[in-house]
């Protein structure tokens, strides 16, 4: 039997709290080699940490403080942060699938750093040297460097004494518009046990509520996507926010119970679903991917991309993900990416070894349809139908 979407006992509600709003920018990543993108996505979870750390409601009227997230062609979202005194600006991917902040260093001379802004510690009056080594690997790329400390600002939120990675070597990042990454995951997956920026926001009493939330728009133009800290934006969702308890406190992971596609239902056990704003795609275990891929009729090209007939998208099935006890549906236009003369499936095979996996990764292709709330205080994720502001 299909689970119902709403249950009165499982709705998230928030008191009137000050909202810190940041608009997002959007960028289109390079999908010329899908194999590289799949490898990079999966290795973000497996390779970014040491083996020991790999994984052993309705809101009343509130105050608003503008902060911008930018969107380009429905695939990658990033925003502007500032580090140091005087502040140095960087564009970063806001990533719920990792937990560290890092930006390129002025000491970085690799090719991937040439197109990006670099942090200059000598120009900051509030810089403090930490000096410990720092490295993250993303499969086909990564960064190495050292840990530094400085003031970190996002929107109107100013975090004191934030530790971050200052990258002196970067690979596999040259085609990415963002300069670095701002991780929003849990401290349990943080490299070097560095307190994530969101933890410091809470410790320094910058937020009324221990939550942040994402609205990711379909719009290619302007800054209509956003992240809010400290509360939710009721103008960007309809209905109620459904609470789904976390499965583990590492990534923002909930229980994945199955998938409806066409006339079929795939029942799964002991599988998690990660809500990952740093991923453009939807990753499925290979066995499940093959079943769904056969139903939607995607074919793999010589570059590793799964190609769809754009004219047949209206005849393809919706996909309904069962998270915990609730159904969340996306349509064919949500799980496909349209290029100039073809459409590419946003579904990719992605397998994780234990104890991390098996996992489903729900990236932006899913999150554009569902307003997502990351509730640290209730150890839960909240989802509601996303909508544009009227």
Image (cartoon, helix red, strand yellow):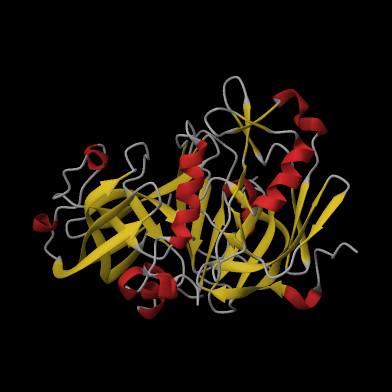
Q: Is residue 206 in view from this perspective?
A: no
Front residue (pair 69, 133): 133
Q: Is residue 156 in view from this perspective?
A: yes
Instruction: Using residue 70 as the reference point, say whether residue 288 is left or right of it.
Output: right
Identify the residue at image location x=60%, y=19%: 341
List x then y, in percent, for residue 123.
10, 55
Report the label total: 0
Identify the residue at image location x=16%, y=43%: 109
Farthest residue toward the left?
Answer: 122
Asked if residue 123 is positioned above or below residue 55 in the image, the reply reads: above
Farthest residue toward the top?
Answer: 341
Residue 306 lies in what quarter of the image? top right
Residue 127 lies in what quarter of the image? bottom left
Instruction: Using residue 37 as the reference point, say whether residue 242 is left or right of it.
Output: right
Which quadrant, please, contains the C terminus?
Answer: top right
Front residue (pair 300, 187): 300
Identify the residue at image location x=77%, y=78%: 9
Asked if residue 287 is positioned above or below residue 72 in the image, the reply reads: below
Instruction: Using residue 250 as the reference point, say whether residue 288 is left or right of it.
Output: right
Front residue (pair 265, 332): 265
List x then y, in percent, for residue 79.
40, 49
Residue 317 lies in what quarter of the image? top right
Instruction: Using residue 20 as the reference point, say whether residue 274 is left or right of it.
Output: right
Which quadrant, please, contains the N terminus?
Answer: bottom right
List x then y, in percent, for residue 131.
15, 69
List x then y, in percent, for residue 352.
55, 60
Front residue (pair 79, 305): 305
């Amino acid at each position: 039997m299909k689970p119902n979407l709403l249950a009165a006992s499982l709705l998230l509600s928030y008191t009137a709290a000050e909202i810190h709003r940041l608009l997002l920018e959007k960028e289109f990543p390079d999908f010329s080699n899908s194999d590289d993108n799949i490898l990079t996505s999966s290795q973000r979870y497996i390779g970014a940490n040491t083996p020991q750390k790999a994984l052993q409601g309705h809101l009343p009227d509130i105050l608003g403080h503008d902060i911008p997230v930018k969107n380009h062609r429905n695939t990658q979202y990033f925003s502007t942060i500032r580090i140091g005194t005087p502040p140095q600006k960087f564009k970063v991917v806001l990533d719920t699938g990792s937990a560290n902040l890092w930006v390129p260093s002025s000491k970085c001379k690799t090719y991937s750093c040439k197109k990006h802004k670099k942090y200059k510690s000598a120009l900051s009056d509030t810089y403090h040297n930490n000096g410990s080594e720092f490295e993250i690997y993303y499969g086909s790329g990564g960064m190495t460097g050292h840990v530094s400390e400085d003031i970190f600002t996002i929107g109107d939120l100013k975090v004191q004494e934030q530790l971050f990675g200052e990258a002196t070597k970067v690979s596999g990042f040259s085609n990415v518009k963002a300069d670095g990454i701002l991780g929003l995951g849990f401290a349990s997956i943080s490299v070097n046990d560095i307190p994530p920026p969101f933890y410091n926001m809470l410790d320094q009493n910058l937020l009324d509520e221990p939550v942040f939330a994402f609205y990711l728009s379909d719009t290619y133009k302007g800054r209509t996507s956003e992240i809010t800290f400290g509360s939710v934006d009721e103008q960007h969702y309809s209905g109620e926010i459904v609470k789904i308890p976390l499965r583990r406190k590492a990534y923002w992971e909930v229980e994945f119970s199955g998938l409806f596609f066409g006339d079929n239902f795939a029942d799964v056990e002991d599988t998690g679903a990660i809500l990952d704003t740093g991923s453009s795609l939807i990753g499925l275990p290979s066995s499940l991917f093959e079943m769904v891929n056969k139903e939607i009729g995607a074919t793999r090209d010589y570059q590793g991309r799964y190609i769809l007939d754009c004219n047949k998208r209206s005849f393809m099935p919706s996909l309904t993900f069962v998270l915990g006890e609730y159904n969340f549906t996306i349509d064919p236009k949500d799980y496909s990416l349209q290029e100039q003369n073809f459409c590419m499936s946003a579904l990719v095979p992605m397998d994780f070894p234990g104890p991390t996996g098996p996992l489903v990764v729900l990236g932006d292709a899913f999150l554009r349809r569902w307003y997502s709330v990351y509730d640290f205080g209730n150890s839960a994720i909240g989802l509601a139908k996303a909508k544009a502001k009227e």
